[in-house]
Amino acid sequence: MWLSCGGSSSSTSKTSGLAYRAFISNNVTSGSSSFAGVYILNALNDTRGPLAPISAGNTPGIMVVTPNIAQTLVFSGNGTPFSDNQFTIINNATESATGHVGLPGMTYSFVVSPDSSTAYVAVPTGAVTGQPSPGVIGVIDLRSAGVTAVISCPPLNPNPPNPPPPPVCVTQGQGDQGINQPYRFLSMGNTGTRILAFSQGANSVADTIAVITPSSVATDYPVITFVPGFDHPVAAFFNSDDTAAYVLNCGAECGGQQASIQTLDLTTNTAGPAGVVCTPGGNPSCIGTLNLTAGSVALVNGSTMYIAGTPPPIGGVPQQPCTGETTAAQSCGLLTIVDLSTMTVTNSGIVITDGYHNQIALAANGQLFIGASTCTEIVAAVPGDEVRGCLSIYNTLTTTVGAVAPGGVAIPNENGDVTGIQPIGRRQVVYLVQGGSLYIYDATSDALEYNPSNPNNPGEVNGLIGYFIDIKIVDF
């Protein structure tokens, strides 16, 4: 069992006095002017806050803000033997860390219950006694900063009852399987009654979704049902009452066969069949599987789903050329738009940058920001040459924005992986972390904003030095 370095620390008021704040994680300490931690920004005027960074481990990176906006959760880890693997809880009101939990390995995904009381953290390398494969999900009480349970199969219970309980690790009614999975990504339902866990590894594992019932976690034997029949799923989007989910299968891009959107019936724990079946009526209810060219990240707005991905090369030859773009890049990705109410593709073949897409956000003025990592980078040899990185901006409007036509795509002239995207709700700008730097985009022009507080570097914050990873708004 894991249990390390949990507990709360004292919290003193360090309020910056800023009315509308963004937190940005810096994972490097460099000289005397840059320290690893979470920096506070004034999101109303694009300036750095007056306080020192909040301590959140040696290399703070990905962050999640709780639904009630009261806390920000930060993971620090770099995947090396010297990684601190620290999970930090920040009180947004006092702008200070209120607790730290040591994890048994890296995490790439954590979710929070709708009541903001509990975090669920996937640790794919977390060891389980008696199991050949690792993989656990830690349950953390955000009030006490303590680990209250560890979800695994078989359960990590050092004192099993006699007689043993009914099967709790079930594969579609086949009985207790006693298997474990290296959980990598998690999706939480709207009501908090279901958590879906997605694994990496061999196809038999990566093609199975673990359906977890959070209400059973408080017991010694949390209930997990393994549902096979998917193709390297990476995310899910739930209907309003959590009776069904739309699952994004990454397919070939993640080592499988076919990318798709596939339904999951959470009343029977069954995967949707091949093809799409719709029930006649004014509001058709569709089940089944809708095949896609590629998909590794998605966003849902109403009944519209935007899906980005890169078809993997075959024999070293890119499958998707950069059709319609003037670029030196030989490989591109695709954006696909799906109507979930009918499970039909409404727009496809929209060319974007390649790479592994894992960031997407819909900003003000209908601008869809899509970020990737390990994309084809074009670096200018001389001033005036093409510069291309991993960011694409899709204009969802029927009117032109800046130089981008309706349904068109802008590729900004900035290099680097995109690791954080945060639309600023009170303004028509977007904070975006690319290549370790923070950029500010104007959603009315799809170009870098002119920041009067930093006239020499448009689209940046004056005096913000470091290598940044993630960005979140922490005020309503």
Image (tube, rainbow, N blue to C red):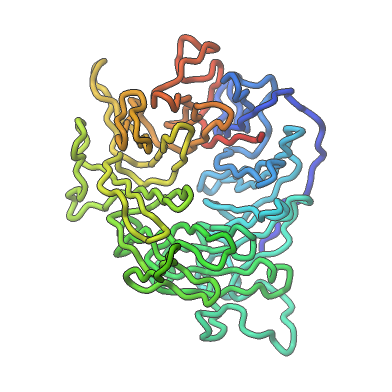
Q: Is residue 469 above or below residue 233?
A: above
Tell me where residue 105 sits by quadrant. Answer: bottom right
- Of residue 27 and residue 69, the one placed in the foreground of this image is 69
Q: Is residue 172 above or below residue 332?
A: below
Image coordinates of residue 183 in percent, x first then y, are 52, 62
Q: Is residue 75 above or below residue 280?
A: above
Is residue 310 among what the camera can see?
yes
Q: Is residue 4 above or below residue 471?
A: below
- Of residue 178 and residue 279, the one placed in the foreground of this image is 279
Residue 328 appears left or right of 467:
left
Tell me where residue 137 sits by quadrant. Answer: bottom right
Position of the N terminus by quadrant: bottom right
Residue at (58, 28) in percent of width and height: 426
Residue at (57, 28) in percent of width and height: 29
Image coordinates of residue 374 in percent, x first then y, are 35, 41
Residue at (71, 46) in percent of width and height: 100
Residue 385 appears left or right of 370:
left
